[in-house]
Image: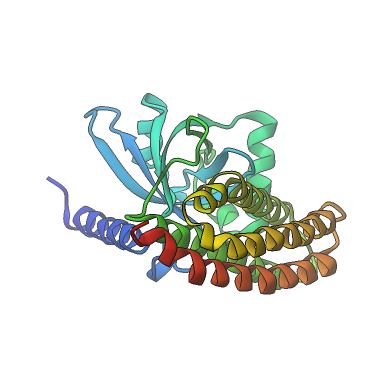
Amino acid sequence: MPNDDNKKFIGFNQQVIDEFRAHHGRVGGPFEGGRLLLLTTTGARTGTPHTTPVGYFPDGGERVLVIASAAGSPKHPDWYHNLLAHPRVTVESGVFTYEAEAVVLTGEEREQAWARAVDADPGWAEYQRKTDRIIPVVALHAITDGGPGKINASSPGEAIKVVHDAFRRELALIRKEMAAGNGTLGAQLRVNCLTFCQGLHNHHTGEDTMMFPFLADRRPEANPVLKRLSEEHEQIAVLVAELRRAVADEDPAAARAEVERLTLDLEAHLTYEEQELIPLLDSPA
C-alpha cells in the first residue's frame, strides 16, 4: 500500500494532469510558465500505463528532450525505468497527442544536451550535485505518420485557437528567457528560437497548402480574408528569417529586437485569423 507521502504525490500529479488536459497545456503552481508535457509510459513490471507531468526542452525537428532528475534523488524516476523496458511512449503537448520512441542519450550527445540544459537552468546542476548517479537525458522522437499527431480540440475552430495559443505561450517563454539572459544568447535559447521558427513555418505552410484551399473551395466569400492571411504569412516569414539570422550570428540584441517585432506582427495576425476563420470553420457550410 502506498504511504501518505506517496498518496500526496500521486494526488498532486493527478491534479496537474487534469489541469493540463483541461486547459490545453496551461497549468499553475510550480509548473506555471514552464515547458511541460504529459508522458505516458508502460509499467516495466505491471505493463499498465502511467502518466507523469515532465518538463522538457525543445530540440528542433521531431524530438524533445526530458531529463530523469527526480529532483536529485538517488534513484531514477519510475517513468525512466518504464521507458527503458518499453521505449514506445505517448506524449501530450497540450495541443497534440502523439506516439514517440524514447532514446536515452549517451556520450558526447548526452553531454552537449546536458550542458545546454544547465546553461538554461542551473537547477539541473544542483540536482546532479545531490546524487551519485548520472542523471539521464532522454530524447522523445515523434512517430506521427507525416502529421503533428492527434489535435486536442473538439472542432476545427477550437483547433486553430489551441494551436495559436501554444505559439503565443512559447514566444512569451522565449521573450522571458531573453530578458533573463544578461545580454547573452545561450545554446538552449538558440535552439528554442530555431525550433519555434520551424514550427511556425510548418504551421503556415500547412494552412497555405491545405486549410486555405479547402476554405476557398467551399466558402468563396472568404477569399479576400484568405488572400490577406497568405500575404501576412509572407511578411511573417521575412521576420522569421531575420530572427534566424540574428540567432545564427549569436547577436543577443538583434535577436531580442527581432523577437519583439515578430511578437507584435504575429499577435495581430493570429487575432485576425481567429476573428475571421473560427466562425467559418465552426458554422454549417
* Residue found farthest to the top: 85
Q: Position of residue 225 (x, y in %)?
A: 59, 65
Is 231 in front, or is 31?
231
Q: Is residue 34 visible?
A: no
Q: Quadrant of the C terminus?
A: bottom left
The relative height of residue 126 versus residue 178 in the rendered view (above or below) is above
Is 76 in front, or is 129?
76
Residue, x 47% and y 59% (percent of image)? 160
Q: Quadrant of the N terminus?
A: top left
Q: Position of residue 110 (x, y in %)?
A: 63, 36
The relative height of residue 13 versus residue 132 in the rendered view (above or below) is below
Q: Is residue 74 visible?
A: yes
Q: Position of residue 88 (x, y in %)?
A: 40, 29
Residue, x 78% and y 67% (percent of image)? 258
User: How many labels, in total?
Assistant: 0
Q: In the visual, does 82 lie left or right of 123?
A: left
Residue, x 36% and y 39% (percent of image)? 79
* Residue found farthest to the front: 220
Is 274 in front, or is 79?
274
* Residue found farthest to the left: 1
Residue, x 51% and y 47% (percent of image)? 214
Is 223 in front, or is 245?
223
Write down the quadrant of residue 5 in the picture: bottom left
